[in-house]
Amino acid sequence: MDILIRIAQLMLSLTILVFIHELGHFLFAKSFGMRVSKFYLFFDPWFALFRYKPKKSETEYGIGWLPLGGYCAIDGMVDERLAVEGMASEPEPWEFRAKPAWQRFLVMVAGVLFNVILAMLIYGGIAYTWGTDHIPMRNVGTSLTYTSVGHSMGLQDGDLPIAIDGKPFEYYEGMMIQKIADGKVLTVLRDGKEVDVLVPVDLIQATLVTDSAFMYLSLPAVVDQIVPGSNAERDGLRKGDRVVALNGVGVEGLHTLLPDIQSGRGDSIRLTVLRDGREVVIPTLADVEDGLGVAFGTPADVLGIEHRSYSILESIPAGVSEAYKQLVGYTGQLKYVATKEGATKLGGFGTLGSLFAPVWNWRAFWSMTAFISVILAVMNLLPIPGLDGGHILFIFIEILRGKPVSLKWQTRLQIFGMILLLGLVLYANVLDIFRFLL
């Protein structure tokens, strides 16, 4: 059931994001007097699930069956459809190619702009509706454990990062590793004393090589919620049980238990839990789809959170700030995709779907949708033919040369870009399949 919930969330999220992205292109094109022949959600090779053209309208609206994106077909533009009919003739006033470069640039960047604005609005809406929750660094204490990369640079388990290049860490958050990697000197609190540790220039890449996190919280594996009708409920697990061993092997904490349960899905397992001061052994099954049906206590549950509520006016800058932070963080991480280690971490639809919660939680859904909107914005700006960034590159080349890129080369580069992008999509989804099978 959790797989179906994740698929539903992913499809709803992609529908919203693709629609908003293409709406940006559509509105800007129409505002500059360009003729838009098609506005499609998802691609429609061979057939469409739905199509409609209003009377006296120049635009056909539709829904395709291939959820790899969408398109806004603007007359006089060589896009992913490779439609070049009539392009050899003189441009008509309503065509994309007949408009000045600055208008074409705005049309192409509009999709990215709308994705960024959407992320800002969603993050602002989250702040207004639910507020924000952060774990103050002071609450983390000595709970951090470092992997081999951290140990090799001189960190010790229990060290508490308090500043990077003199800038203090206020909260414990996922983007800390990027902030540390971008700095030179990490200051940690060790046994009540401040200690400076030099940050290696290849910190992120070295972490990718190890295929493990740079650091993690050593938290007890305490059962917080049990799904009704699950294996956990059937076999007698209770809220408050602390798992101390799996199949007779001691459990250090939640960070080691979860991967072991994941790898043991489909097999019978034996949990040893601490309950009311005594150990209880519980045989159970880690289901392939639903796992144990248990939610363990989160870091926020164990360490405590700092909650802040926002008024409508306060939520606007909060949304802008969070979107900007995610943009900077994701852009900084994108350069590692081109490395050998980063390429192995690419993910397809399976990876995207796994980012959503196994139960429907609107706050988590909107948070993930905003993050994917940031990803789409950044990815679409890459100067690859087939993406918005490729069209923007053609426009810049035209401005520098004083004349447009030839139709022949636009078509060739567009084909190359589409093959490259489809290859990357195929590669990422094959990696997902291997991860699932292994």
Image (cartoon, helix red, strand yellow):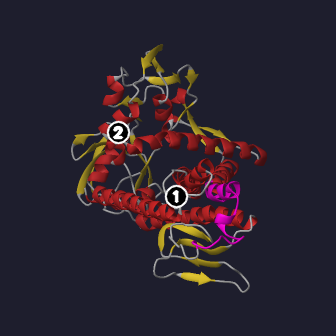
Front residue of 175 and 63: 63
In the rendered image, residue 292, in percent from the top left (x then y), is placed at 35, 57
Considering the numbered disc 2 on the image, is that residue within a helix, a strand or a loop? helix
Q: Looking at the image, is 87 positioned above or below residue 335? A: below
Task: Locate the N terminus and report the quarter of the image it occupies.
Answer: bottom left
Residue lying at 48% horizontally and 38% vertically, measured from the top left: 302
Q: 134 left or right of 235?
A: right
Q: Is residue 371 visible in this depiction of the protein? A: yes
In the rendered image, residue 150, in percent from the top left (x then y), is placed at 36, 27
Task: Locate the C terminus and report the quarter of the image it occupies.
Answer: bottom left
In the rendered image, residue 293, in percent from the top left (x then y), is placed at 39, 58
Q: Is residue 174 visible in this depiction of the protein? A: no
In the picture of the structure, the residue carrying the numbered disc 2 is 208
Whether residue 99 appears in magenta in the rendering, the answer is yes
CA gap between label 1 and label 2 equals: 27 Å
Whether residue 341 appears in magenta in the rendering, the answer is no
Front residue of 35 and 308: 35
Residue at the outermost left position: 248
Q: Looking at the image, is 150 positioned above or below residue 195? A: below
In the rendered image, residue 409, in percent from the top left (x then y), is placed at 48, 61
Tell me the amino acid under the disc marked 1: Leu
In the picture of the structure, the residue carrying the numbered disc 1 is 387
Residue lying at 59% horizontally and 67% vertically, measured from the top left: 77
Q: Looking at the image, is 27 positioned above or below residue 212? A: below
Whichever of labels 1 and 2 marks the residue nearer the N terminus, that label is 2
> Mark 1 touching mark 2, by CB under 8 A?
no
Residue lying at 46% horizontally and 54% vertically, measured from the top left: 355
Considering the numbered disc 1 on the image, is that residue within a helix, a strand or a loop? loop
User: In this picture, which residue range is highlighted in magenta?
Assistant: 87-112
